[in-house]
Image (cartoon, rainbow, N blue to C red):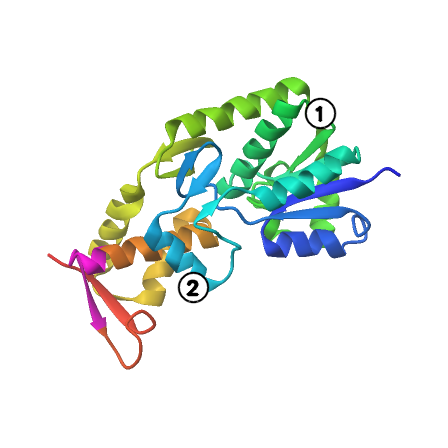
Amino acid sequence: MFKITNIAFGDSLCNYIENSKFSKKDITIKFYVLFSIGKITNNIISYNDDFYNLIKQQGIYEIKKNNNLEEKLKLLNDSINNKHKIRIWTTHKQIDAYLMLLYICNYLANINYDNVYVLFSDEHGKEFYTPSCMEEKELEKLLKYEHKLTKKEINDYSKEWLKIVNDNSDMRIINNNKVESVSFDYYDNFILDKLKELGEQEKGKLMHCLMIPFRIYDTVSYFLVNRLLKMINTNVIKDKEYKHSKWDNAFYKFNN
């Protein structure tokens, strides 16, 4: 019997897909792997210790210190063995969802499986920078943009993934619609410049100001928290404790 396996990044999107009228009989593989942050060696993601501990405390992502993706690949292989149509929900705008596409295409290129389809949310409209921000009706409309990947497209995405692995940088961002490999301190000057501009600032308002340019999503928000704490611990940024925990009730100021 013909079946579809949907592959998507994040809980909310997968829940919409699983419960929608257009795909409730399909299989959904939920990806939580944060490909954007950490060293990549032989397709294994090794997360920075501080960032790993911060994410683990939040309990949002199924994150392991060295995430080798065995569980996700087992589910994918089951679908391939059953000759399912593979449908990847992604975007050109959100780094983890796009890197998921590259990773999967690299895997599929190596086993020469080409019954693969893709949907890019930003092709439906610029405001849909990730399918995770779309509701069921919008996701259903997005289906008309679905297209089958040619073998050349799969191989090209595979090559793009291999270049990223070869770079083996601290983390990856999307800059001018291209994946760029950068170091962990990439956002530090941006954080400090914003603090200089704002002066002493309460934590919540500061995070809001920091997140606006990045179209708020969890990976960047947690990483910015990680960098803030680093700069506090090294006395680059001052913090003042108020009432309860330092993080929940803190004000931050550039230490000049």
- Residue 109 to residue 211: above or below: above
Residue under label 1, please give it.
114
Q: Amino acid at mark 1?
A: Asp
Circle 1 packing at 10 Å, graded few (<14), some (14-19), many (20+), is some
Question: Which quadrant: the C terminus?
Answer: bottom left
| In this rendering, position of residue 190 left or right of residue 147 | left
**Is 237 included in the stretch rendered in magenta?**
yes
Residue numbers of the magenta segment:
231-240
Question: Which quadrant: the N terminus?
Answer: top right
Mark carried by residue 19? none
Mark carried by residue 57? 2
Residue 27 image point, x, y percent: 75, 47
**Is 19 included in the stretch rendered in magenta?**
no
Residue 175 figure quarter: top left
Frontmost residue, 192 versus 34: 34
Residue 248 figure quarter: bottom left
Residue 216 image point, x, y percent: 46, 53
Could you tell me how many numbered marks the image carries? 2
Residue at 79% from the left image edge and 52% from the top image edge: 24
Residue at 62% from the left image edge and 40% from the top image edge: 73
